[in-house]
Amino acid sequence: MTTEHLLQTLRQDLADGGLRAGILVRDLHTGDELGIDPDVQLPSASLVKIPLALATLERIRRGDLDGSTTVEVQPGRITAPGPTGLSRFRHPSWIAIEDLVYLSTCLSDGTAADALFALTPPAYVAGLLREWNLDGISIRHTMHPLTDTPADHLPEPGLAQALAIDAGSNGRVPQLDTTRASSGSARAHVDLLQAIWTPSRIHPDVAAAVRTLMAHNVHRQRLTPDFSSDATTWSSKTGTLLNLRHEIGVAEHPDGQRYAIAALTASQVPAAVQPAAEALMSTTARALHDHLRQH
């Protein structure tokens, strides 16, 4: 199949599945890449926890923070489906900063992430990204606004999803407005992955620590089924908000080849649970990866 035919087929599959997507696969050795609308901007949701982890660990490396220092974390007391870890705790806890980085990154714990943002605000994280020549990802707010969208106050999940879909064109949900929310493109997130997996301005010890965290990500229902195996290491981070389903990661093969992959999607189907959409974004990313690897 030619590249043009493949891209046409995959675009149609995404449209038929009700997904608007920005997807990019890049060979980290050659720089060759293949994607579908990789420059489309979408709110990042929990993908911002990777820059947050980098910034926190960089401050620990510089001596600005002590990773063993414990901080008091108030319970999230969230009862809605989805959030994990401290976000569901009922009582205050004292937790070390480095352990908060683990909870934020590997469990995508929003309450842990906000405890880290209290130490390293969004503007500081954004400034470090610029220092590292990573200009395509905006960090504009903490995680708390993502747990209190207008859609969260609607009685039925279908209504919330319908509002989210409509908000893509009218901006009534600020958390889905790329001019106000933390946002980025598939290309920007692949650039971030490349900076973590190959020599860059990020200190090698910090990059190695984040690679380890991403290898232990517990949310593995999206791209993982198509990229993880006994022979291939898959390290990733997911992001979820209303109708948004994202995952970024790196596949490392036994022959030494490494591919950075970012799949950012917005569903046009008003349903909260969509395993078919997650399977579609995964098979699409895998098809791009396989085509690039074969050629």
Image (tube, helix red, strand yellow):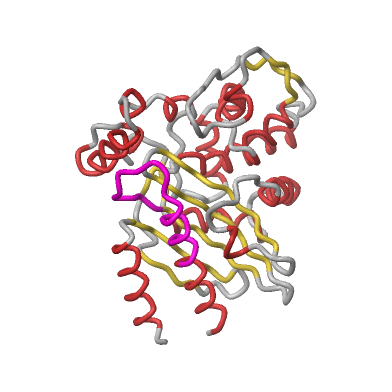
Eyeballing the image, is 254 above or below 161? below
Residue occupying the far left of the picture: 170
Q: Which residues are magenta?
A: 265-283
Identify which residue, 250 or 203, lies in the foreground: 250
Residue 267 magenta-highlighted: yes
Residue 173 screen position, x and y as percent? 29, 32
Quadrant of the rendering where the N terminus is positioned: bottom left
Identify which residue, 282 or 159, lies in the foreground: 159
Quarter of the figure with residue 131: top right
Residue located at (75% from left, 37% from top): 61
Eyeballing the image, is 100 above or below 196? above
Residue 255 magenta-highlighted: no
Residue located at (75% from left, 19% from top): 70
Residue located at (48% from left, 66% from top): 283
Residue 146 screen position, x and y as percent? 43, 30
- Horizontal arrangement in the rendering, residue 34 relative to residue 167 (left or right): right
- Horizontal arrangement in the rendering, residue 71 relative to residue 13 (left or right): right
- Horizontal arrangement in the rendering, residue 91 relative to residue 143 (left or right): right
